[in-house]
Every structure is written in structure tokens, then in C-alpha cells.
Image: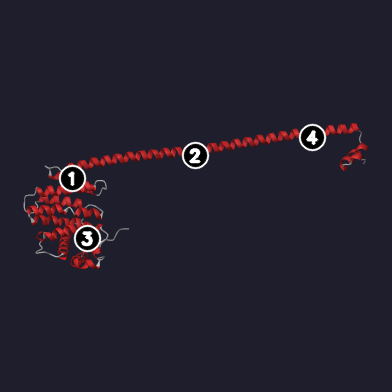
Amino acid sequence: MNRDPVEDALEAEDPAALARAATAEDLARMKAAEELVELRAQRRRRRSRFAVASQVLVGWVALAGFFVNAWQIYANKRQQEQQARSDQEKWAKEFARASQADKYRAFFETSALATDPTNTDKRLVGYALLQEFVQDRDYSQKAMLMLEESLVQELRSNTEEGLDERHAAAVMAIVTALAESNDCHSLQKAARSVDRVARRHAEVQDPVETGEILKVYIRRIIGRAAQVCTSFKDFKEVRRPVRDTIAKNPEVLGLRGRPSVAEVNARMGEVLRDACADENAVSGATDCPDVLRAYAALCTHLDPKEEAENAANCALMKGAAAALPPPAPVAQ
């Protein structure tokens, strides 16, 4: 098979052979044909690049749209969350304002009951309701001051020796409200209200009346302190005002002469033990077992310097606590 000498010369890239095999006209036509083929190839490449660029641009536009949409969703979500927080804060402030207004109104109405000069029953209800405000941080001082002044007013209107039934109920309600705090330091302030009782005793010299009131202080405030205070040191600070009042007026609890601190402590322990014995005998809802156990537990952490003043007192409390039936097991 004969091969074309032009093709052989092109494959061999031999210019001399190509010049011998092809005329100038052939070479011109060949060059023109190659340029045409090259131009067509370039045109196809440009179309291909344009198509690819168009596809890439469409892809980028779609991707950008996706991110813009995602950002819009995120921005809307953030805006909704911010609006929700703003609404929540607004309603929380409104609720706090309304609660504060309701509390103020309730305290005002309770004060009106507790200071009603004509109706004993209303005053008793007011004293009981003031227990809630004794525990409130904002109204504790106001409630305690009102109860102390009410104690003075109740005692001032008592004209008999000792306390009649009406005044005994009022004193019990007032001191119980003062003792309602769950804070040992607040109980220390409550115990200092015994100063009002001491002033009353100095004016009227009624040991029966004063003794009955101090027994309520011992049962309610000292008993509550045994449950609330976590150290004997703090407990002593609650007990001190009552003990000092008894030491200056020993006759109110049947002591004679000038009793020692240990003797006064022991007598206060006897009062608490006897009051709890009476309550345990008639009531199934008394907190006396918890009071006696808590008191005995505090006595196990006595400082050596305090043992002499509290030996007899703590022996009474430990004995009373040991005589109690064991606490019922807590249901699981």
C-alpha cells in the first residue's frame, strides 16, 4: 500500500521532504485548513468555558441563596428568642410588681386586724397571720416590731393577777409568731423582745403574769432555737436575754435568792421539759419530741468552758429525749 509522501513528511516533521512532496499551493491550502480547524476548536473551547462558567455561576448563586436563607432563618430565630426574653423579663417584672403590691396590701390588712382595739378575735387572727411576714425578708423587721408593740398593748390591758384566758391566748399567739423564723439570728432578735416583759414586770410587780409569759418564751422561742440553731454558741445567744431576765427576777419562776447561771439554766430546762410533757400527753401534733431531741443534740457539742453552766440543764434535756419513744421510720 502506497503512503502519501506528504503525510510521511508531516509525521517525520521533515521540512525538506514536505517541500519536495507538496507544492506551495498545497501547503497554503493545508495551512488554511489547519487554521480553520484550530479556529473551530477554539470556538468550541470558548463555548465550553462559557457553559462551565455559567454552571459555576448558577451553583454559586444557589449556594449564596442557601446561605442567605439560612442566615435569615437564624436571624429570625434570634429575633424571636430576644423578643421572647424581653417579654419574659417584662412579665417577670410585672409579676414581681404585682406580688409586691399584693404583699403590701396583705400586710396592711393584717396590720389592721392585729391592731383592732375592739375585737379580740380579729387581733388573734392578725397575730397568727403575722407569722408569715416574720419569715419574709422584706417585712420581718416590721412584723416583729408590730408583734412586740402588740405584746405591750395586750399586757397593758390585763388588769388581773396573772393572765386571764383572753390575754393568755393573745400572748401565746404573739410569742408563737415571733418564734416562727427559720433563722437563728432572727430568733435572737425575737428573744430580745422579752425586754418589754421585764419593763411590764418592773411597773406592776406581778410575778404570776411575768412567769406565765416567760414560760411561753421558753417553750416557743427557746424551743424553736433548739431546732433552728446549728451550734450551742448560737443557741446560747437566743437563750441569754430570757435567762438574764429570769436571773434579775428569780421569783417569777420560783427561784430564791440570787441564783447562779447554772441554776437558771436548769430551771429553764425544767420549764421546757414540763411544758413538753404536758403537750405530749394530750396532743399528737406537737413538735416537742423534735425540740427535745434537737436540744439534747446541741448539748453533745458543748465547749468545756460551758459544761459547768449547762451540766444540769443538758442532763435534763438528754434524759427527756431518751424517755421519748423512737421516731417513726420514714416511709420510702
* Residue 13 appears left or right of 206: right
Q: Nearer the viewer, residue 172 or 254?
A: 254
Residue 4 visible? no
Q: Nearer the viewer, residue 289 or 157?
A: 157
Instruction: Give the x, y percent position of residue 5.
Output: 91, 39
**Disc on the earlier residue, 2 or 3:** 2
Instruction: Give the x, y percent position of residue 160.
Output: 6, 51
Numbered marks: total: 4
**Disc on the earlier residue, 2 or 4:** 4
**Disc on the earlier residue, 1 or 2:** 2
Task: Please tell me in which quadrant of the rendered image residue 17 appears.
Answer: top right
Q: Nearer the viewer, residue 254 or 233?
A: 233
Q: Residues within 10 Å of mark 1 (few under 14, many from 20)?
A: many
Are the two marked residues, 2 and 3, in contact with CB atoms closer than 8 angstroms? no
Residue 79 visible? yes
Are the two marked residues, 1 and 2, in contact with CB atoms closer than 8 angstroms? no
Dot 2 corresponds to which residue?
A: 74
Dot 4 corresponds to which residue?
A: 38
Label 1 residue SS = helix
**Disc 2 to disc 3, C-alpha distance:** 62 Å
* Residue 66 appears left or right of 194: right
Residue type at mark 3 is: Lys
Are the two marked residues, 3 and 1, in contact with CB atoms closer than 8 angstroms? no
**Disc 2 to disc 4, C-alpha distance:** 53 Å
Label 4 residue SS = helix
Dot 3 corresponds to which residue?
A: 236
Are the two marked residues, 4 and 1, in contact with CB atoms closer than 8 angstroms? no
**Disc on the earlier residue, 4 or 1:** 4
Task: Please tell me in which quadrant of the rendered image residue 113 appears.
Answer: top left
Q: Residues within 10 Å of mark 3 (few under 14, many from 20)?
A: some
Label 3 vs label 1, nearer the camera = 3
Q: Nearer the viewer, residue 183 or 128?
A: 183
